[in-house]
Image (spheres, rainbow, N blue to C red):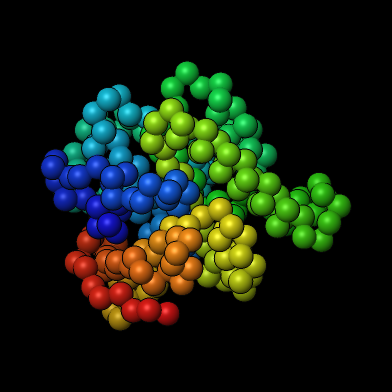
Amino acid sequence: MVEELFFWSGSNHPNPLQQLQHNSNLLLLSGPPSSGKTSLLFQFAFNVAAALHSNPNVVFICNRNRLDSKPPFLSQGIDPSSNVFQRIQIKYVNDDEDIRKYFAAFHLFDKLPDAVVIDDFGDFFDNKVCQQRYSNARGRDLAMIKSLALCHNAINYANQKGPCKLLLSDTHTHQGDSPRFHFIYKKWIHTTFTIKEGDISGSFILKGRSYSRTDTTGTGNMKAAKYSIALQYLVFDGLVNAQVD
């Protein structure tokens, strides 16, 4: 599943959405800084847009300055002039309120997206601003919970019309406030992809884990892939055995 979602295997690439469980509508990609998360997200968006043939609509939500300063890398073999890129809509937002406004208007869209991707979701929640807004020391947590609940409702609404997935990335799950962020995400997200550094400098291991009501440990559905960023390309180095944490 990890390979089909985040890497490219040519024009016969399978539909990545078909690799996901039916109840995996919200997905999380977590990893340390500079581990290629934006590249993996954009490759996912490209894969979805390339595999679907009924005028797909994939929305990539991000901060403009961050994307301009660190553009994503794609796999070798992808034509930079491909019309697939025209099926990916880049939406720039500045903060968590912009994200909530977008999902609050989901029911008004003439055409719902097949997938929505949000790069560095946690970074849109400024701690000081959220504390002032909610007059609460845990304002950022409250803002994230409110936003995730709205995302969950919007994506569930979209899936009444047709398949729609939401993929978020976050770095905070690998920092000092990791336990709290994991607790917040786990309520709404049952499929997570975790990046860890590989045994060689510049290489990484991407592991997928799906939680279900009957498998609360998340160990029943694990895949892992090794990759690297080399010569401005996202390089898939093969599947590896996943280790249970």
Residue 229 position within the rendered picture, expressed as x and y whole percent measured from the top left:
29, 62
Viewer-closest of 136 and 209: 209
In front of the other: 226 or 181: 181
| The residue positioned farthest toward the right in the image shown | 135
Viewer-side residue, 152 vs 178: 152
Task: Evaluate whether residue 167 shows in this view.
Answer: no
Q: Residue furthest top?
A: 110
Residue occupying image coordinates x 76% and y 50%: 129
Quadrant housing the C terminus = bottom left
Q: In this view, does 108 lie above or below 93?
A: above
Asked whether, in this view, residue 141 is left or right of residue 112, the answer is: right
Q: Name the residue rendered at 33%, 29% in the picture.
A: 56
| Residue at x 30%, y 53% (from the top left corner) | 6
Residue 182 place in picture, x, y as percent: 57, 65
* Quadrant in which the N terminus is drawn: bottom left
How far from the left and from the top, in percent, is residue 244?
A: 38, 79
